[in-house]
């Protein structure tokens, strides 16, 4: 076998191995959606409970603020994956809420996940979650 053919075969083998590694890493890490779901559920199970104020809502985002360890945070949460757990009229959620945040990283927080909701509906809006 010629040296040029050997180098070509080695190059193809290297490319194939790199492609296989990328596929394996993606399967292990999962999709962005599954990683986000895992983050929310981990915060639900291990996060510290605190008070938040939902300041604004859009069709797929809650904007809220909270105080943790003397630091004021203003952030948002994509709620598209848990939208079915919230009232149709999201404006009802504006106001006080509970949140869960990471003790090690207080900026990492949620107001709602698949297994829990800190949202409080206003009076006359039906049962709370």
Image: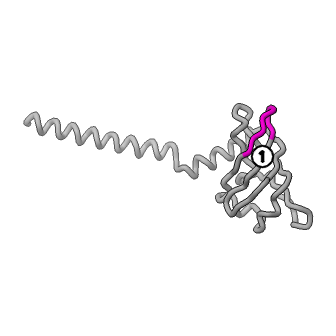
Q: Is residue 22 left or right of residue 104?
A: left
Quarter of the figure with the N terminus: top left
Q: Residue under circle 1?
A: 65
Query: To which quarter of the image does residue 85 belong?
Result: bottom right
Q: Residue at x 76, y 50 (%)?
A: 64
| Front-lying residue, 96 or 38 | 96
| Front-lying residue, 57 or 22 | 57
Check disc 1: other Cα within 10 Å, few if <14, some if 14-19, many if 20+. some
Identify the residue at the far left of this view: 2
Q: How is the image coloured?
A: one colour
Percent of width and height locating residue 59: 68, 63
Q: Is residue 20 left or right of residue 30?
A: left
Percent of width and height locating residue 93: 81, 59
Quarter of the figure with the C terminus: bottom right
Percent of width and height locating residue 114: 70, 54
Percent of width and height locating residue 14: 27, 38
What element does badge 1 sit on? strand
Residue 55 counted in the magenta span = no
| Front-lying residue, 111 or 15 | 111
Q: Residue at x 11, y 37 (%)?
A: 4
- In the image, residue 53 sits, relative to residue 90, either above or below, namely above
Which residues are the magenta region? 67-74
Query: To which quarter of the image does residue 119 belong?
Result: bottom right
Q: Residue at x 29, y 43 (%)?
A: 16
| Front-lying residue, 6 or 120 | 120
Q: Is residue 14 left or right of residue 20?
A: left
Q: What secondary structure predominates along the stretch shown in magenta?
A: strand
């Amino acid at each position: 076998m010629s040296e040029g053919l050997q180098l070509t075969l080695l190059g193809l083998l290297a490319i194939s191995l790199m492609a296989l590694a990328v596929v394996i890493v993606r399967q292990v890490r999962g999709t962005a959606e599954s990683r986000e779901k895992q983050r929310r559920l981990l915060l639900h199970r291990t996060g510290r409970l605190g008070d938040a104020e939902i300041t604004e809502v859009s069709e797929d985002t809650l904007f809220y603020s909270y105080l943790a360890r003397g630091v004021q945070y203003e952030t948002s949460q994509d709620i598209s994956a848990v939208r079915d757990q919230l009232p149709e009229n999201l404006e009802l959620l504006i106001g006080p809420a509970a949140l869960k945040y990471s003790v090690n990283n207080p900026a990492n927080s949620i107001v709602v996940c698949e297994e829990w909701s800190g949202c409080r509906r206003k009076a006359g809006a039906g049962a709370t979650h």
